[in-house]
Image (cartoon, rainbow, N blue to C red):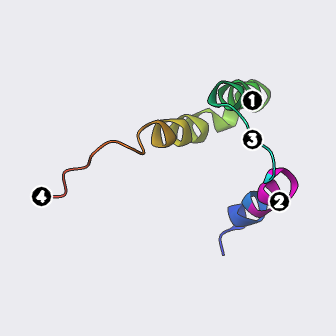
Amino acid sequence: MYFTDRGIEELQKRRGHEEMSIDLLAERMREFVDLNPDFEIPVERLATWLARLDDETDDD
């Protein structure tokens, strides 16, 4: 188990029943980065990864 799994599990436990729009999620991510600028790169990478989930990958 990765250390981050604990945070993910807490999120799921506390907020798993809620629905959130992508716009609200993006706003919360911006707010987090404003409060924690050292996490700008990991948040940007997560946002980019989430944005591209449906992109076709060429594994050849």
- Mark 1, other Cα within 10 Å: few <14 / some 14–19 / many ≥20: few
Assess whether mark 3 and mark 2 are in contact (beta carbons under 8 angstroms): no
Sooner in the amino-acid sequence: mark 2 or mark 3: 2
- What whole-number distance in Å separates the C-alpha atoms at marks 1 and 4? 37 Å
- The residue singled out by tag 1 in the image is 28
- Mark 2, other Cα within 10 Å: few <14 / some 14–19 / many ≥20: few
Residue type at numbered disc 2: Glu
Which circle marks residue 60 in the picture? 4
- What whole-number distance in Å separates the C-alpha atoms at marks 1 and 2? 17 Å
Which secondary structure, mark 2? helix
Q: How many marks?
A: 4
Position in image of residue 55 (x %, y %):
33, 42
- In the picture provided, is 37 more to the left or to the right than 45? right
Q: Which residue is farthest right? A: 14
Residue type at numbered disc 1: Arg
| Residue range corresponding to the magenta coloring | 9-15
- The residue singled out by tag 3 in the image is 19
Question: Is 3 covered by the magenta stretch?
Answer: no
Which secondary structure, mark 4? loop
The residue drawn where x is 58% and y is 42% is 42
Position in image of residue 15 (x %, y %):
83, 50
Viewport quadrant of the C terminus: bottom left
The residue drawn where x is 78% and y is 54% is 16
Which circle marks residue 10 in the picture? 2
- What whole-number distance in Å separates the C-alpha atoms at marks 1 and 3? 14 Å
